[in-house]
Image (cartoon, rainbow, N blue to C red):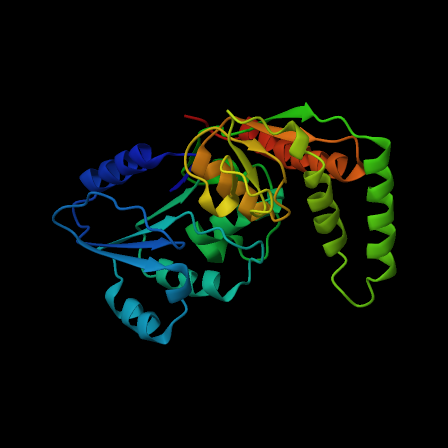
Amino acid sequence: MIRIGLNLNQKQCEINDYLAKTPEIKKIKIFYFKTPTEYVLPGYNVEYIEWSDIIMYKFFYRLLEEIHGDTLIVVDELMRTQNRSDLTYNCAHHYLNQTPHKIIFEYFPIIEQKEDFMILLNFENKDKYKGKGFQYEFLKEEDIKMISRNVELEVIDVETTAKEIELYEKKKENLFANLGNKDPDIIPRNLQLLAGDFKKKAIEPDKIYVARNKRFKLDNVISYDEVVSGEYIVIDMHYRRLNLNDFLKKTQVNKLRYLTTALPIDKFYISEFNNWSKNLEDIYAKASLY
């Protein structure tokens, strides 16, 4: 079963319901990324296994021996790369093939593209979906339910001066001139940091902001690593989709408030966000919702 968009209490309820209907379960293995969700599971042999440990030999062979039909595997927010052939995914598939009892939790149904949903279907049944591209009818073939977690984008305009536009153009020319064999993605990343610097004048003391780093040296501007549940205004849209998704998971907001200049780089990131949001909407429209 695949469950999308659930909070901690809702996940706990799903696990409880599954266990109540499946008395043969004796052991529970929970795969997680970095920070485990501590579920209340008295009376069961529970083991938490972190993403980086899934591929370790000391875990691999032991888990293959231990996981059988009396084992429930909880795959908890483990969609961490768009590469369906990733080694960690492949190792997880070996474990998942050992038991029919599996619950796959993910806050968003995709990382960025609709094809990403195949990662979750591979967790559910690798043999069935191996090598297949995403099709909407797959959403009805398995036990899949979703809570719609689409996020509205609210842009907050920041006045852009002629001098700032000139500085931006010079920075862009310099980045292209010195690119050489470097990763071309450094160009939009660096341009967004510069655009973010121009937004400093819009920072209000009674609001909390998030930026890619601590360059503003203000108590009310934090980095993405420091985010907890709550309301923030975004200065720098994170260039890594997974990091932005993690931010939205932690805050669980339904509206992303974003400071934007008139510069092309902000228009680019707004367009990227809207494309991602549209992909979410399309999947939610075809899925079984709670």
Q: Quadrant of the N terminus?
A: top left
Quarter of the image where one finds residue 96: bottom left
Residue 255 in view of the camera: yes
Question: Is 216 displayed left or right of 63 in the figure?
Answer: right
> 63 left or right of 155?
left
Residue at the farthest left position: 43
Q: Is residue 232 above or below residue 215?
A: above
> Residue at the spot x=79%, y=35% of the render?
263
**Viewer-side residue, 91 vs 32:** 32
Foreground pick, 251 / 112: 251
Q: Position of residue 284 (x, y in %)?
A: 54, 29
Q: Which quadrant of the view contains residue 162? A: top right
Q: Nearer the viewer, residue 37 or 71?
A: 37
Residue at 42% from the left image edge and 60% from the top image edge: 93
- Left or right of residue 183: residue 35: left
Q: Position of 222 compared to 200: left or right?
A: left
Position of residue 39 measured from the top left corner of the image (x, y, whole percent):
25, 44
- Mark count: 0
Rendered residue at 52%/44% (across/down): 223
Asked whether 25 or 58 is in front, the reply is 58
Say whether residue 134 is visible. Answer: no
Q: Residue 210, how many percent across, how many down?
A: 55, 38
Q: Quadrant of the C terminus?
A: top left
- Percent x, y of residue 133: 62, 49
Residue pictured at 50% horizontal, 34% vertical: 220
